[in-house]
């Protein structure tokens, strides 16, 4: 199976995740998360598949998240509004993101990624 690996090339965590995938011979296709920002439809599908709340997909330590003061605003936004916001800027999305048939993992935690082998 080939996964979709959404990453930001200068992100250390993304580079570590890519190396981890390579060392385990996991097949994947890279996608630059800000040059090819996920669409609303993709995000909606991935969020559902992940079983995680929309908030888990936000890069809460990112500059754009902080500039938009989303810590205080997200709770008053609908799920649809949050997904639309995520689809407007790849830097808002927690990375890396790996997507398979029925599997979506957000952020890099090697223990969680063991299921990709």
Image: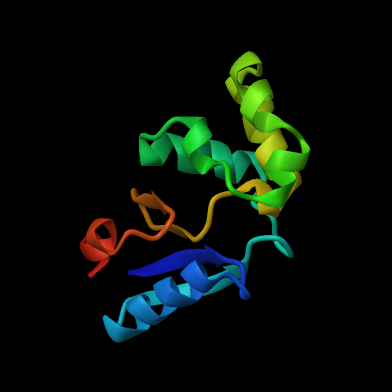
Q: Is residue 55 above or below residue 13?
A: above
Q: Nearer the viewer, residue 86 or 74?
A: 74
Q: Is residue 77 above or below residue 45?
A: above
Q: Which residue sits at x=54%, y=73%? A: 30
Q: How many numbered discs, if any?
A: 0
Q: Quadrant of the C terminus?
A: bottom left
Residue 115 horizontal side relative to residue 90, left or right: left
Q: Nearer the viewer, residue 73 or 29?
A: 73
- How far from the left and from the top, in percent, is residue 8? 61, 68
Q: Which residue reaches farthest top? A: 76
Q: Which residue sits at x=74%, y=46%? A: 64
Coloring scheme used: rainbow
Residue 59 horizontal side relative to residue 37, left or right: left
Q: Is residue 1 above or below residue 47?
A: below
Q: Which residue sits at x=59%, y=18%? A: 75
Quarter of the figure with residue 6: bottom right
- How far from the left and from the top, in percent, is residue 99? 43, 56
- How far from the left and from the top, in percent, is residue 15? 49, 76
Q: Which residue sits at x=68%, y=22%? A: 73
Q: Is residue 59 above or below residue 5?
A: above
Q: Quadrant of the N terminus?
A: bottom left
Q: Nearer the viewer, residue 54 or 31?
A: 54
Residue 74 horizontal side relative to residue 89, left or right: left
Quarter of the figure with residue 16: bottom left
- How far from the left and from the top, in percent, is residue 57? 52, 42
């Amino acid at each position: 199976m080939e996964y979709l690996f959404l990453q930001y090339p200068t992100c250390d965590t993304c580079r570590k995740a890519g190396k981890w995938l390579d060392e385990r011979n996991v097949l994947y296709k890279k996608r630059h998360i800000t040059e090819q920002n996920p669409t609303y439809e993709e995000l909606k599908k991935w969020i559902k598949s992940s079983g995680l709340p929309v908030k888990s997909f936000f890069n809460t330590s990112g500059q754009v998240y902080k500039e938009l003061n989303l810590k205080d605003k997200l709770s008053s936004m609908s799920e649809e509004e949050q997904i639309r916001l995520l689809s407007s800027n790849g830097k808002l999305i927690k990375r890396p993101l790996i997507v398979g048939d029925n599997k979506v993992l957000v952020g890099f935690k090697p223990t969680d990624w063991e299921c990709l082998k």
